Amino acid sequence: DQWPQILATVNWISSHDTSTMYLRHIDVVGVDTKFIERHHQLLGQLLTVVLPPSRIDTSKSGFAARYGFRPKPGYTRFRLLSPIPTFPRGVTELRLRTDELAHLDLGVSRVFVVENEASYLAFPSVPDSIVMFGEGFQSTTLEAIPWLTSKELVYWGDIDTHGFSILNQLRARLPHVTSILMDHDTLLAHRDQFVSEPSPTTAPQPHLTEAEQALYRDLIEDRFGQAVRLEQERIRFSCVRQALKRWNSSGE
């Protein structure tokens, strides 16, 4: 009984330029986005027959992206660590569409990327800088912001194998990235805060520095304990302030 709507949806998609549309723009009687979600496999089979190859991106897995619709936008959340003329005074945190942020050079010299939300929110003031919230961090997100290549870029993640994996992925695309608080001294100063990493990785991380590689190997080889992990929020905040002193002479 839903076959007429299925065919009408295929016909509508095939007769429209969907490159500027979201799925919500489909205008067929009795069809909404939940209908598309329920029947995406069948719709995909029919569209593969009906559409020319140029309108099907087989490298994409999601229905919208594969058949030429606009995907949901990505967002980047960041805090201003000092006033920036681009924004009114009193504005300290924003969440912008990543594709729009890509065209908005904030005019800062330095960008910190922090994985843990509590650490992101408490990150101290640093002149001429912003801090971005990684949110499980996809390095391709920051790669989509071209002006980051001209900024000093500093990453802070958990001291565990996946933290170094994320750093490696980021540096593969933005080779000038440095890291803070991901070293032997920080790890060993917090032995009482060690937890266990659930599923450590042993994959090669060729873009780590020599010191980072050494610590990564120590974690893999369980030198300091079984699957050791030091999460960001477990690092004493005095250590965070100390690590930022090179950029912040006031020590705030």
Image (spheres, helix red, strand yellow):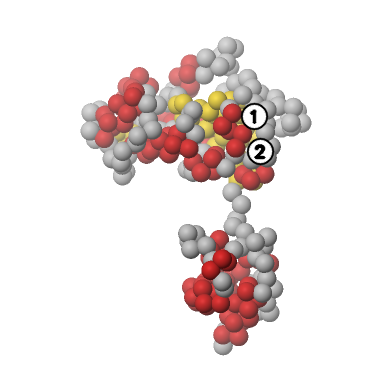
Q: Residues within 10 Å of mark 2 (few under 14, many from 20)?
A: few
Using the rendered image of the protein, determine whether residue 122 is visible from the camera's viewpoint: no
In this view, the residue in front, 38 or 26, is: 26
Where residue 222 appears, as percent x and y from the top left, is: 23, 32
Query: Disc 2, disc 1: CB below 8 Å?
Result: yes
Instruction: Please give the name of the residue rendered at 59% of the width and 49% of the height, measured from the top-left corner.
Output: 74
**SS of the residue under disc 1:** strand
Q: Is residue 226 above or below residue 100?
A: above
Q: Quadrant of residue 30?
A: bottom right
Q: Is residue 14 above or below residue 62?
A: below
Where residue 243 appears, as percent x and y from the top left, is: 48, 18
Number of the label disc, if any, that sits on residue 106: none
* Rendered-image quadrant of the N terminus: bottom right
Q: Amino acid at mark 1?
A: Leu
* Rendered-image quadrant of the C terminus: top right
Instruction: Please give the name of the residue rendered at 35% of the width and 19% of the height, measured from the top-left corner.
Output: 185
Number of the label disc, if any, that sits on residue 94: 2
Using the rendered image of the protein, determine whether residue 36 is visible from the camera's viewpoint: yes
Instruction: Please give the name of the residue rendered at 41% of the width and 29% of the height, measured from the top-left corner.
Output: 234
What residue did someone put label 1 on?
A: 80
**SS of the residue under disc 2:** strand
In this view, the residue in front, 239 or 16, is: 16
In three-dimensional space, the C-alpha distance between marks 2 and 1, rounded to whole angstroms, equals 8 Å
